[in-house]
Amino acid sequence: MTQAVAGTPLQRAFALQRVASDLGRRYQVLDYIGRGATATVWKVRDRITDEFLAVKRFEVTSVSSAGFYRELRMLFRLQHPRIVRVINLLEPAGTARYLLLEYCGGGSLRDAMQTKRSWTWEEAADLASQIAEGLNEAHRQGLVHRDLKPENVLFAGPGCDGKGVKLADFGLARALQQARALAPASAGGLSGTPIYMAPELFAGSFHTASDIYALGVIVYELLHGRAPFAGTAEELAAQHLHAPPRLRPDLPAPGRDLLAAMLAKRPAERPTAAALLAGRPQAAAAPPG
């Protein structure tokens, strides 16, 4: 869903001009897509390949350490139909970094959830299976998303290879934390979005199972129309750590068991992505990522 750039029309024009100048003649800047916590996102066209791309613009000061490059090298090797492809990194004139990504024009799962309030178990399970495919491949390579949420689940749509959904921003939370050397466990230094964060993330620990918990929160939200917990970062931390989620009594028994396993407080009690795909919700989770 395209959003307006914050500011006056003149400020928006200057922002587009700055991105176009930084990217050079090869890339035609077409539209502003949105803004996240660390970057603005733009739609561009590669004039050589005639391919549409999404470009994330990071301020250099926000990603300034070698940790960013170490994590990014792993992302370049991550190639899977359920994961948005990382294409290139540009660093013009040292003013900003531009991450070039596969463009998915079908909007995000969050967009879909805002227009479709009621999801059946079958629909939620199908989406969860597609997301688990991407998680399984990344976890197999030792990567953890750490910020899985509906905004980072994109429908392929026009200009994107494949069908269904793809996972975006894979590993960027980790890369940005490495770059900033954030202190874990502080409300102001969380690596992720508190509504979807697994209990262990609030203590600065992370596992491949942390992504399974976030997937469980997404499935819960699809089925219940809301996330299992709400409140400030501190209140969410306490609820994720201690409060049991209240599940709909009318869910089919296998669905209730699966969702409860994904939302288990202890990482070792959650299924792996591979176990989800194989229909074995009772399987033990993988070791830390």
Image (tube, rainbow, N blue to C red):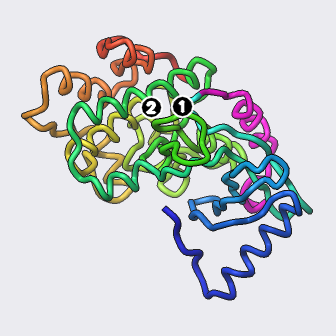
User: Which residue is tagged 2?
Assistant: 131
Q: Amino acid at mark 1?
A: Arg
CA neighbours of label 2 inside 10 A, class few (<14), some (14 to 19), many (20+): many
Q: Earlier in the sequence, mark 1 or mark 2?
A: 1
Which residue is pictured at 74% across the width and 65% down the height?
A: 29
SS for callout 1: loop
Residue 178, position as x, y percentages in the image: 69, 42
Q: Is 98 rendered above or below residue 203?
A: below
117 or 40: nearer the viewer:
117
Q: Is 136 rendered above or below residue 33?
A: above
Name the mark on residue 82. Answer: 1
Residue 95, position as x, y percentages in the image: 84, 65
Which residue is pictured at 83% across the width and 61% down the height?
A: 23
Magenta span: helix, strand or loop, mainly?
helix
Which residue is pictured at 75% across the width and 80% down the height?
A: 14
Picture quadrant of residue 234: bottom left
Span colored in magenta:
58-80
Which residue is pictured at 56% across the width and 60% down the height?
A: 36
